[in-house]
Image (cartoon, rainbow, N blue to C red):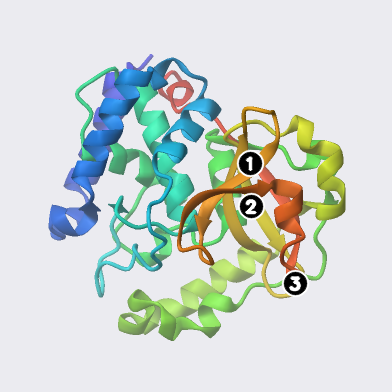
Amino acid sequence: MRSLGFFLSVLVITLVQGRSTTLPFSTIFRGESVFNRLIERAKEEHWRDLPLGDRTVAVGKALLGTPYVNFTLEIDDHVEAASADLYGMDCWTFFEISLAFARMLDIKSDNYSPRDLLALIELDRYRDGRCNGSYTSRLHFLEDWAYDNERRGLVRNVTRSLGAVLMRGRYLNEMSKTWRSSRYLRNNPQLISQIRQIEYRVSSRDVYQIPKDRVAFVQSKIRNGDVICITGQGPEGFTEHVGLAYRDGSGVLRFMHASKDRREVMIDVPLQNYLYRYRKFAGIIVVRPLEVRGQAAA
């Protein structure tokens, strides 16, 4: 039986001793003042006492107004490292930072540090929970993130239990086709073949979605803090966008996300309305994060 302190220590030691240490800390983490502000607010508002979903939403709400910034994970020409930028986020880094911060509050009771947050981001962001210094160790596709994290007991993909349908005729080739847009792939073109293999492996799995015309019928079963992966019409790719489910004071299910159009983290319109704002959206995949603490006792 491993203690929580031992579990987090292993994560932090892995990060500190790994290849990520070849990059300066100022490169892998930005926003210590924001981190400290979040810690103080978490203590004042007793976020640690909340269930994980509500805790994640509390963190997300505290980040409202954060500028939308893309490519914040492209931090080096060669070395991939677990990193976080609290000054600017895209749709993916917004939800993963919110979730990692919420989990951190459960694992430790005090003396939080940015390295604690980075360790939990690494656990979530990388295949098998480990960044090995290579770009290909990162989970680049939401459907692959859900698959890998569910396999490790960190999330539960509840989509099929909500009456989902199989997404047919899909393929992935965006990353290998547009490799020049990635700093890592431009400087390491030998990785493109590995990316193609990952794309093939992910697209060969069965992926389910809830079509947007059915969301209204299942939204009562979606919980605060669920990760909402928005699917596209295809056939290229599965997902287009991601954010968090948020129930407002009236119980309305809204979409909280880092908006590329509004250029900031925001609480948007009700989820079912948001899905009809863009013709390219087809439906949703609903992924429910679980406490990491359960992994410590395994």
Across the whole image, how many numbered discs are drawn on residues? 3
Instruction: Report crowding for label 1: few under 14, some 14 to 19, many 20 or more residues within 10 A (C-alpha).
Output: many
Dot 2 crowding, Cα within 10 Å, few <14, some 14–19, many 20+: many
Lateral position of residue 244 relative to residue 298, left or right: right
Give the vertical position of 241 relative to 107 (above or below). below
Estimate the spatial distance between the alpha carbons at disc 1 and disc 2, rounded to whole Å. 8 Å
Label 2 or label 3, whichever comes before in sequence order? 2
Q: Is residue 286 left or right of residue 46?
A: right
At label 1, the amino acid type is: Val
Counting residues from the start of the chain, the first of labels 1 and 2 encountered is 2
Which residue is drawn at the image coordinates 38% and 83% (left, top)?
Answer: 189
**Considering the numbered disc 1 on the image, is that residue within a helix, a strand or a loop?**
strand
Q: Find the distance from the CA under tag 1 to the CA under tag 3.
A: 20 Å
- The disc at residue 229 is 2
Picture residue at 55% right of the left edge, 61% below the top: 141
Q: Which mark is residue 287?
A: 1
Q: Is residue 49 left or right of residue 274?
A: left
- Residue appearing at x 70%, y 72% in the figure: 171
> Which sits earlier in the primary sequence, circle 1 or circle 3?
3
Q: CA distance from mark 2 to mark 3?
A: 14 Å
Residue at numbered disc 3: 234
Mark carried by residue 33? none
Residue 157 at what x, y percent from top left?
A: 67, 40
Assess disc 3: are there few (<14), some (14-19) or many (≥20) residues with their C-alpha within 10 Å of its C-alpha: some
Q: Amino acid at mark 2?
A: Cys
